[in-house]
Amino acid sequence: MKAHPKRTTACPLAAVDQRLADSHRFWHQAEAAYFDPDGFRLGAQSAIQTLRSVTFIVQKNKSAIPGFEKWYGDWQTRLRGDALMRWIVEARNRIEKEGDLEAYSYVRAEIIASYVDVGPRIEVPAKLFQNPAALLRNIPAGAVGEHIWRNGVLRLQRRWVENTLPDYELLDGLAIAFGKIAELVHDAHRQIGLSPPETIHDDGGERFDLPAMGWRMPCMIAHEVPRTLSVALSDGARIEFEEKTISKRLRRRKLRTFWPIFLMIQEWR
């Protein structure tokens, strides 16, 4: 986890600040488990439940907030008018009373065999819980040449979507909802006459101005790397890539390689 609210024990809303920080931590746990369906489910649902509980704790501490009824009533009207925030409430209720959310996953896979990004496309059938080895077995015989089988890379990109929130990637939707609740928490501090809790970066001490950033934590904006997995075609071993800058002359030489073959895979639960 990259960032957290800076809290002091003297703050009357310390419990609120802690719960908001907990929801942020669960979000990152879900992101880290993006290719582990069970781990992702646990992290995402914990983030939803914890984020929803922030407003419960705000209400529990209403005696510390001057003019609470009018102030919180305005916030309730605002949040109830937001479709995403209504979904958070409904999703939390379903998790608590009915069980797991119903999510489906979209997976895009491509065989990387050159430094260019054009080439023929083929579809490969897939199921939700298939691992990379199973996906490799689904590649049709003769789809790629022997050299590509020996040296090529299969890159998988997963996208989780909840059935009742089809317009959002799930973590992106939760990140936006986190920002809206963070705005409420900041406003609660101002209502008391306190400075909002600072959001700092663990490894560098960098402070974020969340209002100026549209209430989007930089570490919670969609990142391709945690949602991408690369494996070798030859044996299914996981591969890590690093980016390097090369000269135009060297880049022209590297273009004289193989055409890539892209596999589009869609899987549903």
Image (cartoon, grey):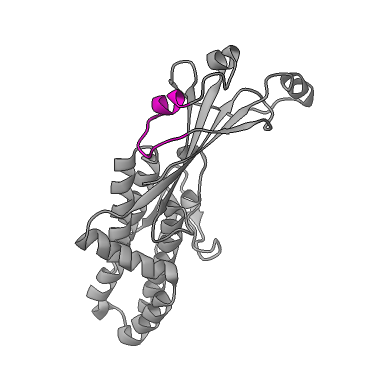
Up/down of 248 relative to 163, above or below = above
- Where are the magenta residues, as a range? 125-138
Report which quarter residue 85 is drawn in: bottom left
Which residue is pictured at 51% across the width and 61% down the height? 209
Residue 50 position within the rendered picture, expressed as x and y whole percent measured from the top left:
28, 59
Residue 162 position within the rendered picture, expressed as x and y whole percent measured from the top left:
39, 55
Which residue is pictured at 69% across the width and 32% down the height? 118
Give the tally of numbered discs: 0
Residue 194 seen in this snapshot: no
* Residue lying furthest front: 141
Which residue is pictured at 51% across the width and 66% down the height? 211
Which residue is pictured at 50% across the width and 20% down the height? 233
| Closer to us: 11 or 81 | 81
Residue 234 position within the rendered picture, expressed as x and y whole percent measured from the top left:
48, 15
Up/down of 90 relative to 127, above or below = below
| Closer to us: 171 or 208 | 171
Report which quarter residue 189 is drawn in: bottom left
